[in-house]
Amino acid sequence: DSGVTQTPKHLITATGQRVTLRCSPRSGDLSVYWYQQSLDQGLQFLIQYYNGEERAKGNILERFSAQQFPDLHSELNLSSLELGDSALYFCASSLGLAGGEQYFGPGTRLTVT
Amino acid sequence: AQSVTQLDSQVPVFEEAPVELRCNYSSSVSVYLFWYVQYPNQGLQLLLKYLSGSTLVKGINGFEAEFNKSQTSFHLRKPSVHISDTAEYFCAVTKNTGFQKLVFGTGTRLLVSP
């Protein structure tokens, strides 16, 4: 158990819909990262938040957004969903902005039908 | 930018045999290197990491890896595998200063058979 929690574990929704994925980092970690894992793209970095502020963006679509709340949990919002958005979405956390390993949550499997 | 190449998409091996999973990276700056393992239907678990110091790093479950700067490699080894080691293994790299997103390889599926 990494100490990072994600909900829900599974999510099935239809095209055009909007969903919210939730992540709670390990106790004491200030950085939260979101990654997408799909068969064709592999593991891709989406976005990072540090202590409530967005710090870096990766291959994140404009239809996707995220935020980190004062209690440090984070939410990833996916809107206007397409079939190609079906993937595993991982949250990871680390202590600081830089400096070492990231600890991953169990992931949310999103299926868009 | 950093990149990672895992040349072997799948490595079949018999139980109790040794195994090496290959990882090569590319970067114009100094890096940190990691190996993660993903068991079926689970998240990623950190196996081991190289941040600095000794180039031979030991991780969990009997795995070890050696950082070779001249060959830009970070191969993962285990002297004797178990059935339970069957999983997907990902090598990852990040630059060692500033913002650090993990850049992952495509993964190597280790298949251990009796």
Image (tube, coloured by chain):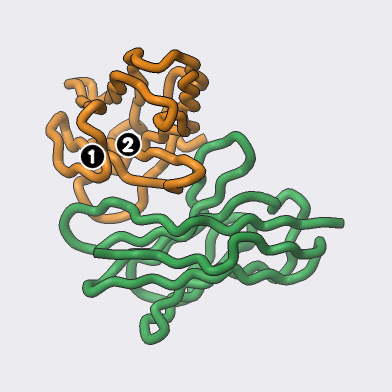
Residue A34 marker:
2
Residue A4 in view here: no
C-beta proximity under 8 Å, tags 2 and 1: yes
Instruction: Tell me what residue is drawn at x 38 percent, y 25 percent.
Output: A82
Quadrant of the drawing holding the N terminus of chain B: bottom left
User: Which chain letter matches label 1?
Assistant: A
**Residue A99, image x, y percentages:** 25, 55
Q: Residues within 10 Å of mark 2 (few under 14, many from 20)?
A: many
User: Secondary structure under badge 2?
Assistant: strand
**Residue B71, image x, y percentages:** 42, 84
Instruction: Tell me what residue is drawn at x 33 percent, y 70 percent.
Output: B52
Q: Is residue B76 left or right of residue B29?
A: right
Q: Residues within 10 Å of mark 1 (few under 14, many from 20)?
A: many
**Residue A83, image x, y percentages:** 44, 26
Residue A15 marker:
none
Do marks 2 and 1 share a chain? yes
Please name the color used to draw chain A. Answer: orange
User: Secondary structure under badge 1?
Assistant: strand
Q: Three-letter amino acid code at disc 1? A: Gln
Instruction: Tell me what residue is drawn at x 27 percent, y 25 percent.
Output: A74
User: Which chain letter matches label 2?
Assistant: A
Give above or below for B31 relative to B45.
Answer: below
Residue designated by label 1: A48
Question: Which chain comes out green in the rendered image?
Answer: B
Q: Is residue A67 left or right of residue B111?
A: left
Q: Is residue A44 left or right of residue A54?
A: right
Q: Is residue B104 left or right of residue A59?
A: right
**Residue A26, image x, y percentages:** 36, 33
